[in-house]
Amino acid sequence: MMDRAGLVGADGPTHCGAFDTTYMACLPNMVVMAPSDEAELMHMIATAVTIDDRPSCVRYPRGNGIGNCVAAAKVLGDHGVSATVADARFCKPLDGDLIRRLAQEHEVLITVEEGSIGGFSSHVSHFLCLNGLLDGNLKVILHHLSHEFSKL
């Protein structure tokens, strides 16, 4: 379990988990999970307990990152722009079928994460590149934290 993942506000820069996905996802065979709510957290803990052939971790952030994305999609919808919010629960293994489908069905793919470069966004862009999904007109925008220690 990685508690206080991502932006943690008053806990300060020493407790900001900006690099946890980056350092965990680079390990061979590591399963990296990130729930968006308490119900998913319980399921992911149960999943982690059943994984006995490789290491796994659950990244548990404070706040509701997916809620911010849903709110942004609603604002876009109010302005006539259709947006799909996909709750990517696994950084590793990446849901390649989902990423491929989103890339093929949309003109723009935006990733949003409370982590630094080398995390989820980097894994998505790497998948898109390896699978020829950047060869067309797809625009990709990666939103992640800067590659420095947080000043929060």
Image (tube, rainbow, N blue to C red):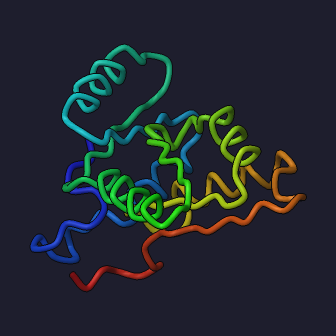
25 left or right of 35? right
Foreground of the two, 26 or 93: 93
The percent position of residue 66, horizontal first and vertical second, equals: 34, 51
**In this picture, residue 96 sits left or right of residue 88:** right
* Residue at horizontal 82 percent and vertical 49 percent from the top: 130
How many numbered callouts?
Answer: 0
Given residues 19 and 86, the one toward you in this image is 86
Query: Looking at this rendering, what residue extends furthest in the bottom direction?
Result: 151
In the foreground, 62 or 75? 75
Q: Is residue 7 left or right of residue 113?
A: left
Q: Looking at the picture, how far across and down is residue 98, in whole percent?
A: 63, 36
Residue occupying the point 27% across, 26% down:
45
Residue at the spot x=30%, y=42% of the render?
Answer: 36
Give the residue furthest to the left.
Answer: 10
Q: Which quadrant of the figure has residue 35?
A: top left
Residue 54 rendering spot, x and y as whole percentages: 49, 25
Occupied quadrant, residue 134 = bottom right
The N terminus appears in which quarter of the rendering?
top left
Asked if residue 120 lies left or right of residue 62, the reply is right
Which quadrant would the C terminus be assigned to in this image? bottom left
Toward the viewer: 10 or 76? 76
Q: Residue 85: percent from the left, percent from the top?
A: 48, 47
Tell me which residue sits at (32%, 45%) in the image. Answer: 59
